[in-house]
Image: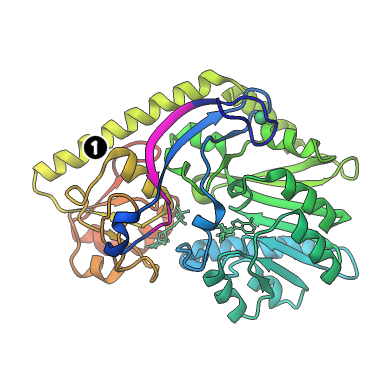
Amino acid sequence: MPNCLVCENKIEPFMSFGKMPIANGFLIPAQFDNEYFFELKVGFCAECYMVQLTEHVEQEKMFHENYAFFSSTSNWMSKHFKNVADMIMSKYLNSESPFVVEIGSNDGIMLKNIASSGVPHLGIEPSSNVAQVAKAKGINTISKFFNEKLAASIVQEYGHADVFYGANVMCHISYLHSIMTGIKKLLKPNGTLIFEDPYLGDIIDKTSYDQIYDEHVFYFSVSAIKKLVEQHDLEIVNVEKLSVHGGSMRYFIANKDTRKIENSVTEQLEIEKNIGIHLKPTYEKLSISIEKSKDKLLRLLKSLKEEGKTVVGYGATSKSTTVINYCGISDELISYITDTTPIKQGKYSPGKHIPIRTHENFTANYPDYALLFAWNHSQEIFENERGFLKNGGKWIEYVPKVGLKE
Ligand code: SAH
Ligand code: TYD
Ligand code: ZN
């Protein structure tokens, strides 16, 4: 059995999705023969409660100069991150020399709001193509992987930070102890670590197994984060449940015994106890639900094909790579996937090589059905795609349940 990346205890794998390609590895036909695969397998640590992958893809294989995920493709997420910036600036910059550091700052979706307010900031974004977009917006960005060593050099060059922020990135990093040590070095003694990631409680509740892919090394819960940060003399002082990305949790962390601990922390720990986040059978049940979800989705897609309906995918998400490859969905079941991201268009989906087409392609010739891979953006998408419904089109959803949208 593999060892836990956090506490080194043995972890118990509870689900294998089989061979998987890189979730954001959109490719051209010349690359099909050399495509990289690994076994996507997820396990639970009964000692520190951290749910995690058991095989890991090298970070340079996932985050590089051709990274395909651009945060600013969602207007709703832009608003979300504007609110984050406002919260940081109004509540967490008490000092006379404010400084905000963000890791995984991507195309600057959050930091642009900090930069435009003239607050000293630094974005750390190893994928150089997305980092370049942020730089072009005037956001101070370095294109490196954050770790303990980089933290020390940032302190030397810029001094200590009031806030260290990360959205949908902490769960991507296998070397969490180095990250925590680096954050401690980088923060002022009364500084705040704030991060948000997809929440394990939602994955269990909604059977949203498509959150499981190479980039997501960890599936965080308050229970597991508590144990992790305690090892670094830090403590969770507040948590906030968020609706973004299909259900996320935001953690506020400070040096031990420096802040009041909000009730939200104990309340959420209690909720997690009731869900059984610390118990192995919870994950055995989850794996059964995942298999059922797969069977149901395949049955639905196959029956639509038999009826001669046209079906396309909506949103070439990283999440869709898990669904498509685990369920074995080929271009016979889904003729193409529509996505607004230029770098994905004209390429093929990882593993099953379904073509990625523009949004214009979708609107010019609506299909009978669209399988909503970007289900986490459903409100934004349903608002924008009234024309599809008017045209008689129907949405297929698979989270939280497989079925047609009523
Ligand atoms: N924060 C953005 C982007 C999330 S995608 C949002 O929520 O929309 C994750 C990002 O983290 C990618 O852009 C990736 O390049 C970056 N990343 C991955 N490992 C990192 C590391 N060790 N340090 C800093 N950034 C990292
Ligand atoms: P997202 O669900 O945010 O992330 P992940 O890759 O982590 O699963 O990805 C959304 C994808 O959907 C992204 O490639 C952009 C695309 N998209 C559209 O094509 N149209 C839209 O209206 C929205 C909101 C997203
Ligand atoms: Zn552990």
Residue 241 in view in this figure: no
In which quadrant of the rendered image does the C terminus lie? top left
Kind of residue at disc 1: Leu
Residue 91: image location, x then y, percent: 79, 59
Q: Does the magenta-highlighted stretch encompass residue 22?
A: yes
Q: Residue at x 54, y 57 (%)?
A: 60
Kindly tell me whether mark 1's CB lies below 8 Å from ligand 2: no
Which of these two is toward me, 12 or 195? 12
Q: Position of residue 134 (x, y in %)?
A: 59, 74
Q: Secondary structure at mark 1?
A: helix
Q: Residue at x 20, y 62 (%)?
A: 366
**Residue range corresponding to the magenta coloring:** 14-25
Vertical placement of residue 138 versus 58, above or below: below
Front residue of 131 and 37: 37
Is residue 370 shown left or right of residue 48? left
**How is the structure coloured here?**
rainbow
Instruction: Look at the picture and state if 174 lies above or below 203.
Output: below
Q: Is residue 263 magenta?
A: no
Residue closest to the eye, 105 or 34: 34
Q: Using the rendered view, name the quadrant where residue 155 is placed.
A: bottom right
Tell me the chief SS of the magenta region: strand
Residue occupied by mark 1: 298
The residue depicted at 39 percent of the width and 69 percent of the height is: 343
Q: In the rendered view, tell whether residue 133 sits above or below residue 331.
A: below
Q: Can you name the residue that lies furthest to the front here?
A: 34
Q: Horizontally, is 189 left or right of 264 in the view? A: right
Give x and y (percent) for residue 281.
52, 18
Where on the image, by quarter, is ligand 3?
Answer: top right
Residue 67 place in picture, x, y as percent: 48, 64
Q: Would residue 186 appear left or right of 241 to someone viewing this image?
A: right
